[in-house]
């Protein structure tokens, strides 16, 4: 692939990333769930090892002030044997005030961890397009996870909400000439809430809303993820987005602003250590032959 083609592809990648981040800025401050980036690393063969980091930031208006929300995620994907994949994901959400908060306003933060195992299948393996580096891949995973969401009223008190999750994920992606790909993932997710703890003078309505979550457990979410990535053998850049729909709505709570974040986006980098080691080994072998 020539340099001109690479530059054109990256320009489209950056443009798509910018538009996605703008469109997916969430206005929900007090949330009981946020979707994590789907497992879309793209395993293809035994020995694959991929590590990624993603980031996004948005500004949320909260009453007479604004909050900056940061989303940071890390993923690891490994294929220990042919057609088998194991993946892990850690995601954090952090709010910080852009100016001084009043005593009634709230900051939220959350941490989520996921592990999944499954299989991948190269649908067009053995075809002429496959020989040219174009691949159509289907991945399926069974996963579990856990997390905690914390709410901090400026001077009134705080609360914590613990959750466990179970999910299935199916991911289809098309790889063009080895280093560029686009894919879509579908993920039905079931979330259970428990052990809500409250400290300080927390508003009664907020307490009742937290208790409602435990009564409604398990809650079903259907998530759809998209990813576009491109780069080189060892390093690739990506932009991804996830949309989430819930089996419950704001009408299930006293506070109509208490809802789930229904979309997130991230821009990041994927590093493939196995490719780095393989190329270093080949260079060392070539040097010894001279």
Image: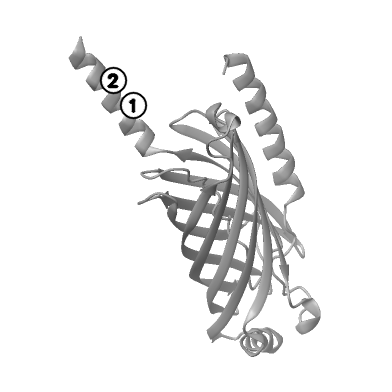
Packing grade of label 2 (10 A; few <14, some 14-19, many >=20) is: few
User: Where does label 1 land, which residue?
Assistant: 279
Name above or below for residue 282 compared with residue 82: above
Query: Residue at point 52% right, 45% down?
Result: 42
The numbered disc on residue 42 is none
Instruction: Indicate the quadrant where residue 245 lies.
Output: bottom right
- Check if mark 1's residue and mark 2's residue have beta carbons within 8 Å: yes
Determine if residue 118 is in view. yes
Name above or below for residue 216 compared with residue 24: below
Name above or below for residue 63 compared with residue 20: below
Query: Residue at point 63% right, 19% down?
Result: 5
Q: x, y (%) of residue 56? A: 61, 48
Determine if residue 102 is in view. no
Q: x, y (%) of residue 16? A: 71, 37
**Regarding mark 2 in the picture, which secondary structure is present there?**
helix
Image quarter where the N terminus lies is top right
User: Where does label 2 land, which residue?
Assistant: 283
In the foreground, 235 or 195: 235
**Regarding mark 1 in the picture, which secondary structure is present there?**
helix
129 sits to left or right of 120: right
Image quarter where the C terminus lies is top left
């Amino acid at each position: 692939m020539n340099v001109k083609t690479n530059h054109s592809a990256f320009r489209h990648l950056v443009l798509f990333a910018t538009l996605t981040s703008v469109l997916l800025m969430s206005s929900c401050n007090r949330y009981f769930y946020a979707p994590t980036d789907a497992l879309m690393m793209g395993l293809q063969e035994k020995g694959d090892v991929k590590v990624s980091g993603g980031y996004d930031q948005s500004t949320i208006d909260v009453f007479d002030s604004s909050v900056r929300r940061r989303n940071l995620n890390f993923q690891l994907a490994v294929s220990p044997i042919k057609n088998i994949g194991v993946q892990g994901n850690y995601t954090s959400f952090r709010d910080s005030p852009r100016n001084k908060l009043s005593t009634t306003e709230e900051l939220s933060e959350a941490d989520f961890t996921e592990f999944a195992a499954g299989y991948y299948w190269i649908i067009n393996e053995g075809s002429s397009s496959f020989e040219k580096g174009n691949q159509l891949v289907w991945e399926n995973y069974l996963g579990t996870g856990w997390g905690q969401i914390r709410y901090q009223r400026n001077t009134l008190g705080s609360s914590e909400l613990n959750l466990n999750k179970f999910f299935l994920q199916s991911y289809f992606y098309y790889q063009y000439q080895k280093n560029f790909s686009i894919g879509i993932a579908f993920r039905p997710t079931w979330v259970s809430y428990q052990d809500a703890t409250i400290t300080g003078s927390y508003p009664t309505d907020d307490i009742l809303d937290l208790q409602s979550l435990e009564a409604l457990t398990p809650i079903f979410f259907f998530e759809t993820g998209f990813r576009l990535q491109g780069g080189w053998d060892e390093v690739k850049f990506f932009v991804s987005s996830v949309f989430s729909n819930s089996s419950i709505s704001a009408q299930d709570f006293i506070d109509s602003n208490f809802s789930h974040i229904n979309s997130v986006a991230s821009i990041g980098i994927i590093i493939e250590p196995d490719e780095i080691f393989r190329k270093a080994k080949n260079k060392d072998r070539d040097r010894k032959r001279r």
